[in-house]
Amino acid sequence: MNNELKELYRYRELLYAITYRDIKVRYKQSVMGFLWAVLMPLMIVISGVVVRYAYALASGKPLSSQDIASVAVKSVPWAFLVSSIRFACNSLTNNYSLVTKINFPKEIFPIAAVLACFFDFFVASVALTIVLIVSKIGWSAYLVWTPMLILTIVLLVTGIGMFVSAASLFLRDVKYIVEILLTFGIFFTPVFYEIRMFGAKGKWLLLNPVSPILDGLSACVVRHQAPLLSWLGYSFGVALVTFLAGFVFFKHLEPGFAESI
Amino acid sequence: MSEVAILMDHVYKKFRKGETYNSLRDLLPAVTGKMFRGELNQSDKREFWALQDLSFEVRQGDAFGIIGRNGAGKSTLLKILSRIMKPTKGRMVVNGRLSALIEVTAGFHQDLTGRENIFLHGTILGMSKREIQSKLDQIIAFSGIEEFIDTPVKRYSSGMYARLGFSIAAHVDPEVLIVDEVLSVGDYVFQQRCMDRIHSIIEAGTTVLFVSHNLKAVTEVCKRAMLLERGKVLAIDETGVVVRKYLKEGVPSVVSQKNEPAYISKVAVRDRAGEQSTFESGQTCWVDVEVVARKAIDKLAVVIWFQDETQYIIFHTSTERLGFAPFSLQPGGTYRCTFELNLNIAHGTFQLITEIYRYDIQKSYDRYYPVTTIFVGSTTAVGGAVNCFPRLIESGTFASSGQPCEV
């Protein structure tokens, strides 16, 4: 695997070029331009606010601005997760002619897909940060956890991306299964709701490796607390294993790509 | 300069014919079904070998040709060489950076401009950004589309598209270059430019693997060549020898209508020594044609013509045009004639076709297509269809005053 990682490093310029192409093509000739990056997270935030408003009505507690901020902080990375897995899943089939004609490490495609979506995520995060500063959410030393949290989600998503892109090349319906999981995944992840709403049963939700990450972000950005460290360790472990397993799986299937398309 | 650039050592490649399971919906029932019947590990009978026991080596700086009919395994071989596919068995060594002039536009993105695509595709082909930057002007000039270089490539004509692709690929400066049928790209002038570029790449010491159906181009470019047939090596030798073998082995389909009232029973092309398929430019050859009639038939003539790879008829004649009266045959009767031809043809591969024709009612009875393919060898001093046997009488440079320069 060491050699394969070295080869990937040798082709880093190609990785940048493909990422740059994916970003450029998306922003080119679209009237919305950078608004695209903000649109999907914004839609999720609005849906979340509607859901939280319903909770507030049902429970009789008023909806606080902190609740809305928490939904927003978790929606943006969730949007990143959904779009990058979806984009990565189709990355090999979309680059059909390159996969079958020219030799280079093909994991560049799913990784570039994640990076291109990360660019969108970055744009949306900047927009969100401005909103949070304006709404005087405040800050604390716990913010130092955010890079770690973001790294964990990127590792996880890249691993899943390599896994599903390779699998979808051999089995056409993997794409549809991924689509279903992405659509309904939001109900099993604390994006609209909070872990603590479930009380003692909350730990079952934390088994979903995305939950501790999103909850951690909400903790250190909005609630000014430390993330749940042991659970975060669990998430990081799962993300690392997913990334490495995804890479090995991808490399194992790679020699058959050209024949199976 | 005698280091080995490419080594293939007993390489095999197996493919599976027919449908494979490409969705979970099909795969799961099929696998469980097989498990119940206990035949999970049975080998598939639909396998076939695309390459069998392929061994050859190419030395550094050599130009090596690969010829063979469609389905001979040329493309599979190239895919293995460029490491897109893995051989099923065997060993392969390629020393140095390898680049392929195959599908030269594979990395293009429709929405990007020509310039952006040069950077994208150049990187895909293994050039660094700085390298592309330094060759940018050269690439654009070679493609001849300076005017449209900042237009998205989706607005390009297919010729412009292919030309830009070739220009990028031709400037990669690899140590080993694979050229596959690129000569089908662009117009005649651009094709000539491509050939010139390939020649200069070879002169620069690059190892070239040249795959083409254009035998003329192969003999021009390569010293040695390999003939593939159904995944096996038939010959590896000097290009001329291999081309001759290819033409001899392969008189392909001969369509002679044996239900016509008269048919061509025999055609032979020969020189003084007997039947041949290769000739030198300027040589004399004889074409013997034999016609047999099933029913009584009147006013026939025998027509023969040569055409080149592009189906262009370079020469055409008939018994009637040469002043012989139409002939008539009784059932079972035979007619024989011999044409003497002076092959004032330039270097190339040509097909001979014969036909029985009745001029007054313009009816064709039987066509022997192609009878044979002949290969005309010549010096590379001439090209095109005919050999006018040129001689250079005078040559010199002149100053603007029109006076010869003092040397």
Image: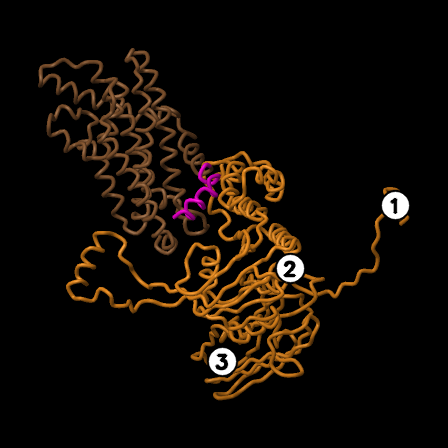
Chain colours: A brown, B orange
User: Toward the viewer: B240 or B36?
Assistant: B36
Tell me: A134 left or right of A25. left
Residue bearing mark 3: B263
- At label 2, the amino acid type is Met
Tell me: A157 left or right of B54. left
Q: Mark 1 falls on what kind of element? A: loop
B148 is higher (above) or lower (below) than A174: above
Q: Position of residue A144 (x, y in %)?
A: 33, 22
User: Toward the viewer: B213 or A84?
Assistant: A84
Instruction: Tell me where residue B328 sits by quadrant.
Output: bottom right
Residue bearing mark 2: B1
- First in sequence: mark 1 or mark 3? 3
Q: Is residue B187 magenta?
A: no
Contact? badges 3 and 2 (CB < 8 Å)? no
User: Toward the viewer: B115 or B335?
Assistant: B115
B378 is higher (above) or lower (below) than B132: below
Residue B402: mark in rendering: 1
User: Toward the viewer: B321 or A215?
Assistant: A215
Q: Which residues are magenta?
A: A1-16
Q: Mark 3 falls on what kind of element? A: strand
Q: CA distance from mark 3 to mark 2?
A: 57 Å
Instruction: Tell me where residue B83 sits by quadrant.
Output: bottom left
Q: Position of residue B362 (x, y in %)?
A: 53, 70
- At label 3, the amino acid type is Tyr
- First in sequence: mark 2 or mark 1? 2
